[in-house]
Image (cartoon, rainbow, N blue to C red):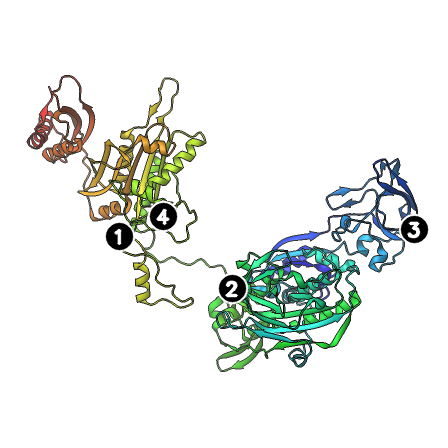
Amino acid sequence: MRVPLSWLREYVDVPADATADDVLAALVSVGFEEEDVHRFELSGPIVVGEVIEFTPEPQSNGKTIRWCQVDVGDEHGGVRGIVCGAGNFFPGDKVVVTLPGSVLPGPFPIAARKTYGHVSDGMIASAKELGLGSEHSGILRLVDLGIDAPVGTDAIALLGLDDIAVEINVTPDRGYALSLRGVAREYSHATGADFRDPGTGHDDAVARTPSGFPIAVDDRAPIRGRQGATEFVARIVRDVDPSRPTPPWMITRLSLAGIRSLGVLIDITNYVMLELGQPIHGYDLDRLQGGITVRRAEEGEKLETLDGQVRTLSAEDLLITDESGPIGLAGVMGGGPTEMSDATRNVLIEAATFDQVSIARTARRHKLPSEASRRFERGVDPLVPYVAAERVASLMVELAGGTLDTELGGALGAPYRRDPITLPAGFVSGLIGVEYTDDEIVSALRLIGCTVDERDGGWSVTAPSWRHDLSDKWTLAEEVARIEGYDRIPSVLPTPPSGRGLTSAQQGRRRVANALAAAGFVETPSFPFTTEDQNALHGSPSGEKLPSVKLANPLDGLAPFLRRSLVPAMLQVAHRNVSRGIVDLALFEIGTVFLPKPGVQYGTPSVPPLAVRPDAATLTALDASIPPQRRHVAVLLTGHTVAKQPGQVAVAADLADAVDAVRVLAGAAGLDIELVQAQRAALHPGRTARVLAGGVDIGYVGEVLPAVSADADLPGRVLVAELDLDAMLDLAQSRVVAASLSGFPAATQDVSLVVPVDVAAGAVRAALLEGGAPLLEGTRLVDDYRGPGLAEGTKSLTFALRFRADDRTLTAAEATEAKLAGVAVAAERFGATIRD
């Protein structure tokens, strides 16, 4: 809301020396946010001049200019020669002259310059050049504005161009502040300055007496049982002259408030809307057919609005109609056929109160926000329509030369009342945490317009008509805190209860993420949306279509399903990076996948009512309507793990790097894992493994098929791994390992075993560990040889072994004995032999 200070001073005593910052500081103290300060971006000398004479001079380009002699006063150099291209002024006219050194909005500095064979010593300004409207066809004649000022008078002050507006942010619950009336009242609250309410003087007897012009409300389908229109006041002004100029003071105030001048009749309705917060609409009375009826639209009914658009209406839209049909969207925008124009002579003024929900839904349905709908959907004062209609009528009489028709007009409405709110004693202090006295509470509520009556143990409070947001004791308490000052509320940090913090699952997820980041991987969160084909390819081992959750209103119609795997999104992230020249990638993501059970229908059966806590059965039904959601962790590698550099060739990422990443995150989760060769639809059949932990399948690791990589526009090899992080952390919690650390040195030996090629290295490693226990502390595969010197169908696996005892330093013989015990187990299970 932009508030011109000259306008604000009409309703509240703002000190003459108060700056825009002072006004903003006062409004901030009562809960408004400051936005900006607006002013006319011009500077003088800009003065009143009188055209003494001019000489028309035709030019070779077909244009005729006037070489003018303009008297700007002795203090500004007397008579000056000025070139002007306009032709709408005459000798003796008073005009606005921008002298050399002045600056017009743009910025457009004015200087004496040679043009059309003369030195133009200034410029005669139009209304548009001064920021007083959009008229640019001719210069501004002061006689048209009813102004006759002495030559040399400062035109900036004369036309109100020295005014300033402050802008504040008005939250949706404080719609009363979308008016000068509301802001002036709030400034009075902040400073104690006297407030003069321009919204007083309504006469219930007159305002609610149906007479004259026929008005009816026929709302047969009210939304939430609330009638679409509860107040409708009409006044008629005849014989207006729409060609009369809008006074400069009104144009400057409207401009500073962010509304451009559109002619005196429309300017008056906008001016009163800003003044009182009551949207006003004017109809060309001669274009109306019969009386006015407020009703709901018929589904598919048409209406041409003021913006020239023909709109198809919904049955929820509230309409203003006459005998010809719809003539306006109530509270949003009027219709084209009955709008006021340059030909209008008789005006019907409408000031109404419409249902907030109806107006908000209509404005959003038609994507048609307006200054009127902005106010109606926040709530207007139901007691101000009569005052607003009378104010508009009086201004049209004064500024447009009309005559108020006292016999014709109409009013429709019901007596207004609000239910009182019970405010218990001690409630405000208990809620806010500040000790307020009874006098402070009562005076604060009365200050904002409430009626306060004492009751046993508290007060009965009736909120004013303009404060729709005051609906219960909590909102009353907030008002007391706001009026008495937020600075009285102490800043106290709550003391956290002991024994709280991250859960074990949260700690585990953080350890995994930190471990992968420390290993050089970059986290790349992504959206959980994908296609059904991608879910089938990556979300199941064999590529069959398993159940997927399809969104009813997806952000992207090409990807309407929730993901069963993290890999598709990671392939997209990799492609996006490669397309931008980042080709060496090590990525990871921790995110949720959605795994609906076959045959189960998911989705909320019904939406629980608002403002009511759901019961246990409803909560259970809501939980059952959500598909299982597991948290997975996935990694992706492509390109090089070591870049080419002096003395070092580039090292491409391979399956071993992906396996190492799996071991890193398993170690961070606290699990021992085993890899078993497997197959998946999207992965290379010879380079894929299942990841087991304690015999439980927790995920997979492997190389993406070249065809799948090509479909993702990724060159080279792509390695991925995806593990069920929730399952990993659940398994880790079930394993409690407490072991002492030996202070004795380790003994190391290697062993090479020949086994059939179909025997997994992980199984051989497990056999060595089992047979070598308890002295065999760890094993690591260092070589897999399948070349000359070995029988066909066999391979040689070389393991590095590490032995340690808790109570002594092992001898070489003891280490060898433990090694041979492990070899014996491998020989028994797989026919393993020691390679010569």
Residue 126 position (above or below residue 178)? above
Q: Quadrant of residue 567?
A: top left
Residue that mark 2 sits on: 299
Mark 2 Cα-neighbour bin, 10 Å: few <14, some 14–19, many ≥20? few
Circle number at residue 61: none
For marks 3 and 1, give the CA distance.
Answer: 90 Å
Residue 761 position (above or below residue 264)? above
* Residue in the picture at 27% in, 47% down: 546
For marks 2 and 3, give the CA distance.
Answer: 61 Å
Residue type, label 1: Lys
Residue 65, image x, y percentages: 86, 42
Residue type, label 4: Phe
* Residue contact between numbered discs 2 and 3, judged by CB atoms under 8 Å: no
Mark 4 Cα-neighbour bin, 10 Å: few <14, some 14–19, many ≥20? many
Label 2 vs 4, first from the N-terminus? 2
* Residue contact between numbered discs 1 and 2, judged by CB atoms under 8 Å: no
Residue 373, image x, y percentages: 59, 62
Residue that mark 4 sits on: 561
Label 3 vs 1, first from the N-terminus? 3
For marks 4 and 3, give the CA distance.
Answer: 77 Å
Residue that mark 1 sits on: 597
Between circles 2 and 3, the one closer to the viewer is 2
Circle number at residue 91: 3
Label 1 vs 2, first from the N-terminus? 2
* Residue contact between numbered discs 4 and 3, judged by CB atoms under 8 Å: no
For marks 4 and 1, give the CA distance.
Answer: 15 Å
Q: Nearer the viewer, residue 582 or 301?
A: 301
Quadrant placement of the C terminus:
top left
Q: Nearer the viewer, residue 508 or 158?
A: 158
